[in-house]
Amino acid sequence: MTAARPSLRRAGAARAWPWVRWLARRAAYGALIVLAVTAIVFVATQALPSDPARAVLGPDAPESSVRTLRAQLGLDRPLADQYLSWLAAATHGRFGVSLDSGVPVARLVGERLGNSLLLLALTALVVIPFALVAGTALAVKRDSLADRVALPALVLVKATPEFAIGIVLVMLFATTVFQWLPAVSLLDPAHARLAQLDYLVLPVATLAIASAPYLVRLVRGATIDALDSDYVAAARLRGIPERRILWRHALPNALLPMIHGVALTFGVLAGGSLVVEVVFTYPGLGTALNAAINVRDVPVIQALVLLIATAVVAINLVADLLAVRLTPRRRTAVTDRHARSVPRFPSERTTEGRSR
């Protein structure tokens, strides 16, 4: 019994090693993308014509005070040294102090991060089930009147900018037509976020309406492809009921494209929610980034860009992992590709040498 345990451990390590290699490679690619984005944003903020020190002290500040503040902020150093120093501090969670408010950037971002995550979570709870149900229904009723009307409507909604959708919703439900909901979403920090859901209805509805058309059309197309496949035709020939074919055969295969679609959608929402937050004055990362850009608060801009880029890369990494794990062909390709790179144990090499 004890002799079998090392062999089981070796077998488990051999199975896990390809996935470790695959995940490490994807994570390395993602880290390079994040570094590239932060470097571009860092150079862009430094290339702006205004001076952060002058923006903090005001236009009437003496030049000596401006030079002193530039030296304190490290703005008189070479650009490469500034970036490397910021990157080294960021890896330890130190993002400096806001030039506008004097508050540590980590605390400022942490206060807004929860609000933005709540907004995206509520949007996901609305969009994903709706897209799954609506896309499946349109696929089952394809070429019907409802399908022919829904497809152009989805394209029209998808082509509408998010800020325009938000303004229309404000006019309909907050100001001009009805006064059912607040026009702005200023959350009270003294109360729990979930106790102020009326302030979240319009921002969530705006993001849901903007992101639903893509996912609905994606689910519709994937479901139609699955219903037209050979294995579904074989299932029909065996007399399997149509409802069981839909739920047991078609939808599981249609979910795989939706994984990447959801990842792409929420990668876009990570940036698109910034616009919606500004429209509704929602206290999230979007309003913080907009305010930081207006006053050229460089530490806040750099921290928020790093956070958003990391979130987008992480979302896509999780989506790739789920898609590979749920697709037998891609799962087999990962294990076969890395089979030769699995580390050998000394006992295995000795046994192999004796057999030769």
Image (cartoon, grey):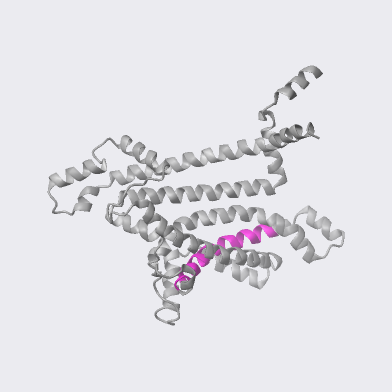
Above or below residue 67? Residue 285 is below
Task: Please say whether residue 356 is visible from this viewpoint.
Answer: no
Query: Residue drawn 45% across and 51% down?
Result: 308
Q: Residue furthest front?
A: 2
Above or below residue 113? Residue 23 is above
Q: Nearer the viewer, residue 142 or 174?
A: 174
Range covered by the magenta-colored residues:
199-223
Residue 253 occupies quadrant: bottom right
Above or below residue 26? Residue 263 is below
Q: Nearer the viewer, residue 137 or 82?
A: 82
Residue 319: percent from left, percent from top: 59, 50
Query: Residue drawn 70% across and 68% down?
Result: 141
Q: Is residue 200 magenta?
A: yes
Side of 297 where 329 appears, left or right: right
Query: Residue drawn 72% across and 32% down?
Result: 10
Residue 82 occupies quadrant: top left
Residue 66: percent from left, percent from top: 17, 46
Side of 291 where 11 appears, left or right: right
